Image: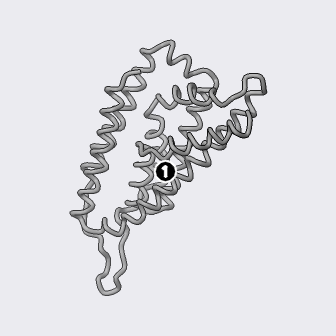
Amino acid sequence: MTLSTWWLFILMTFVVSATPGPNMLYVMSTSARHGVRPAVVAMLGCMTALLAMMSVSAAGLGALLQTFPTVFEALRLAGAAYLAYLGVKCWRSPVQDRRGDGATGSLATVEPAVPSGAIYRQGFLVAASNPKAILFAAAFFPQFINPDAAKLPQFAILLTTFTVIEVGWYFVYAVSGKRLSIYLQRATVMRAFNRLTGGVFIGFAALMATARE
């Protein structure tokens, strides 16, 4: 892999990672509701799933899913069902005013604390709900690997590069979510935010369920 090939990979990955998707939405909404630290846990969950999916893609699972489309369809529909469930859960989340003490001007936490394990697990499931990530890695990564050189070191470089860029965008979305939290102290605004994020998750679910290769 030449240096110019690596820079092309960086550019394309930067654009792909910047595109809003379920992972970015989950990180942003977690930051808005609970703060940046829980959002970091959400990032870890998402990245664990992504790295695992890309690793199994490199091991040949992407080709397996293409060979057996029924298996892929089952995974795709299961992922869409989970995103729809998450959307309904967000839509129906209870809300209340959390504007803090007016005398001190302090702001209370937008929502009660959620165990880190639950946030990590949900982040993992959000990222793992899209089996197309496996096919994407199977189709995308080989374009930048020199078949005449050792493949494992090249894959490690590409995977590390992808991780750095993806996590960088996660932090951009997390900071954006944290800034939103100031406006989510009112129950009416929080309810609107829940319905917006829930609706977007349901929209992602619908797109995944109806998409065809």
Looking at this rendering, what residue extends furthest in the top direction?
Answer: 67
Question: Which residue is found at the position 43% from the left and 59% from the top?
Answer: 31
Q: Is residue 61 left or right of residue 154?
A: left
Q: Determine whether 148 is above or below 117 in the image.
A: above
Image location (x, y in percent) of residue 73: 40, 20
Residue drawn at x 74%, y 35% is 2
Residue 213 image position (x, y, % from top left):
41, 21
The residue beneath circle 1 is 42
Residue at position x 50%, y 32% from top?
A: 133
| Side of 121 where 209 appears, left or right | left
Residue 160 appears at what percent x and percent y?
66, 43
Count of labels shown?
A: 1
Left or right of 57, for residue 193? left
Local SS, label 1: helix
Q: Residue at x 31, y 49 (%)?
A: 197
Residue at the far front: name it.
Answer: 4
**How far across and down, in percent of the image, does residue 169 sit?**
52, 52
Q: Where is 143 relative to 88, above or below?
A: above
Residue occupying the far left of the picture: 188
| Residue 5 in the image: above or below residue 171 | above
25 horizontally vs 146: left or right: left
- For the N terminus, the quadrant is top right
The quarter holding residue 181 reads bottom left
Q: Nearer the viewer, residue 123 or 142?
A: 142
What amino acid does circle 1 point to? Ala
